[in-house]
Every structure is written in structure tokens, then in C-alpha cells.
Amino acid sequence: DGGITQSPKYLFRKEGQNVTLSCEQNLNHDAMYWYRQDPGQGLRLIYYSQIVNDFQKGDIAEGYSVSREKKESFPLTVTSAQKNPTAFYLCASMGQGSWHQPQHFGDGTRLSIL
Amino acid sequence: AQKVTQAQTEISVVEKEDVTLDCVYETRDTTYYLFWYKQPPSGELVFLIRRNSFDEQNEISGRYSWNFQKSTSSFNFTITASQVVDSAVYFCALSEAGSGGGADGLTFGKGTHLIIQP
């Protein structure tokens, strides 16, 4: 079945360490997104990519980095510069020219600091 | 700038009661879409409905109904005869056509935690 796969489901980060969250989709979607969710908060956009080899900062990009080398993959790196990384991270995708369509979401990754 | 407000942080009702979740939005675009998503305890987001800015027709799907009113910039969601399985966090979200052709990401409200007690 087509969908979005995020891994791992749970991730722990040590101080000063970079960690990478994986997001893979087999929906042949052009656009991909990363959102962060904190308790009692809505989702906030970190980065998004509308085509391969191109991406834009969202509302809270500081301390994060992304790459888009393949259409189906959009990994998110949480760098040591992100001082408060503990959150639930959701990846989403959407087909080109279908901005009015709902975004498809993965099951999320919960990141915690050790 | 666009904004979505869900003023109700948490709502608790007894099973079989009707409940309405409020959503108020702000946008300068004349072309936009509104969405409702459900987030059960497992964490994934489940799409419920979308509505475009040119269609103010209300919609009913089983026990769910949506009331879109451009005059008040609201897109409210009602669950009739609520059930325990409806317990979840519900998010309202906005997508604007904007300069990016609408692919710039969704703007979410903070969500309403709905608790249905047996």
C-alpha cells in the first residue's frame, strides 16, 4: 500500500549530538513537509520541499537541516543547535498541483533528550 | 499572515451527547482550503474533511457535520451522538493558494482535546 514511513518511532538524543529522522514516501508525491508538535500545541512547519534538490524554511527552521536528493525521501536532521528538541515530529507529503488535497502524514517520531 | 484559532483547549462530554468544536481562521487570500484532522492517542493524523473558500455548503458525513461561514471566518465541526472512540485531539488547518501555489504547508490551530466519557 502507498504511504509515508517514518523511522524510528522513538529516538533519544544526547547533548551535543546530531540525529536524523527518516521519512520515505511511495505515493509519487512531489512536495514533502516536516512538522513539529509540542504538547498542547498545534503542528508547526519546520521545512518543506516542493521538488527534488530544493527546499524552503518553514516557521521554525533554526536548529534543523534537511536534504531532498530523491523524490521519495526527505530526512530531517536535528542538530545540536536545537536546544529544545524534545517533541513529536511528523512528516507529510502532497502531490504537485494538488495543494487543495489533504496532506498525507506519517505516524511520527518521538524525540527525547537523554 | 494566516492564522487558525481553536479556542477550546479541552472538551469533555458524556457519551451520546452532541459536541461542537470551533475553528476561526484569518487569511488575506480569497482562495484557500480548510481542513479538519483527527489525532488519536497513537499520534497519526487522520484526514476528515476539506472545504474550499468558494463552497459554503455545509456537509454531513454520518455523525459528523461541518458548518463553514465565510462571514464569520469559521469552520466548525459537530459530532452528533458522540462515542468513546471519538476521543482524540482535533485540528483545524488552513491552506492558502498564495505565491507557492498552495504547496507552502498547512497552518494548524493548537487543537481541541475531546474526551468522551462512557
Image (cartoon, coloured by chain):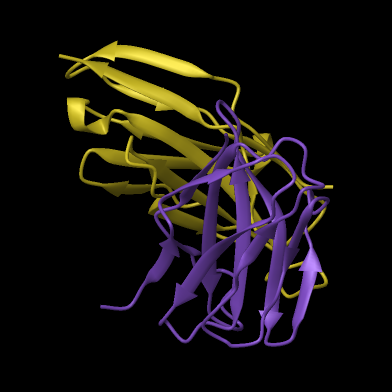
Q: Where is residue B61 in the image (x, y as percent from the top left)?
A: 26, 49
User: Closer to the camera, B2 or A66?
Assistant: A66
User: Closer to the camera, B114 or B96?
Assistant: B114
Q: Which chain is purple?
A: A
Q: Is residue A48 left or right of residue A95?
A: right
Q: Position of residue B3 (x, y in %)?
A: 74, 41
Q: In this view, does A81 lie to the left or right of B40?
A: right
Q: Which residue is drawn at 66% across and 86% down?
A: A69
Within the image, what quadrant is residue B15 found in? top left
User: Closer to the camera, A74 or B101?
Assistant: A74
Q: Where is residue A12 in the image (x, y as percent from the top left)?
A: 53, 43
Query: Is residue B104 visible in the rendered structure shown here?
Result: no
Q: Which residue is drawn at 25% across and 29% down?
A: B80
Q: Which residue is drawn at 46% across and 46% down?
A: B36
Q: Position of residue A109 (x, y in %)?
A: 47, 50
Q: The yellow chain is which one?
A: B
Work out whether A68 lies above or below B20: below
Q: Is residue B89 left or right of residue A76?
A: left
Within the image, what quadrant is residue B95 found in? bottom right
Q: Quadrant of the C terminus of chain B?
A: top left
Query: Is residue A17 visible in the rendered structure shown here?
Result: yes
Q: Residue at x 43, y 57 (%)?
A: A8
Within the image, what quadrant is residue B31 found in? bottom right
Q: Is residue B87 left or right of residue A53?
A: left
Total tally of numbered discs in the picture: 0
